[in-house]
Image (tube, grey):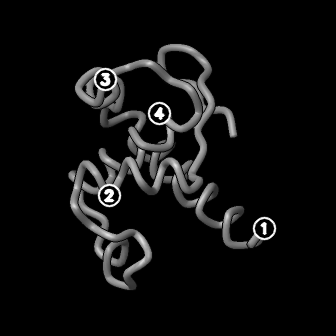
Amino acid sequence: MKITLDIERDFVLDLEAFQIFEEITGLNIFEEDTLARLNTKKLSALFYAGLKAGGCELTKEQTDKLVTAKRMQMVTQAIHDEMDSSSKNA
């Protein structure tokens, strides 16, 4: 999916993204409670992982700076939509 922060970027939650998430957090995304209580650290890691898997070359710190309070709803909606479409395509 496309998401526009400073510019339009690809956002993909696939196996590569899940591995990046696991490397950052040490959490297994497939364990039931991992995303049940999404906090800012998990949100940051998952959003960064999805951008990275989509080919984005920003660092995690640069990505975090792009997610302002105004963009938070858009980011959480993108994660929800991508997770929903991933489960439908399984």
Secondary structure at numbered mark 4: helix
Residue at image position (35%, 78%) is 36
The residue type indicated by label 2 comes to Glu
Residue identifier under label 2: 22
Q: Point out the tag, 1 or 2, that comes first from the N-terminus.
A: 2
Q: Quarter of the image containing the C terminus? A: bottom right
Horizontal and vertical percent for residue 81?
A: 63, 57
The residue type indicated by label 4 comes to Lys
Secondary structure at numbered mark 2: helix
Residue identifier under label 1: 89
Residue at image position (62%, 55%) is 82
Horizontal and vertical percent for residue 89?
A: 78, 67
Q: Residues within 10 Å of mark 1 (few under 14, many from 20)?
A: few
Residue identifier under label 4: 52
C-alpha span from label 2 to label 4: 13 Å
Disc number lying in front (2 or 3): 2
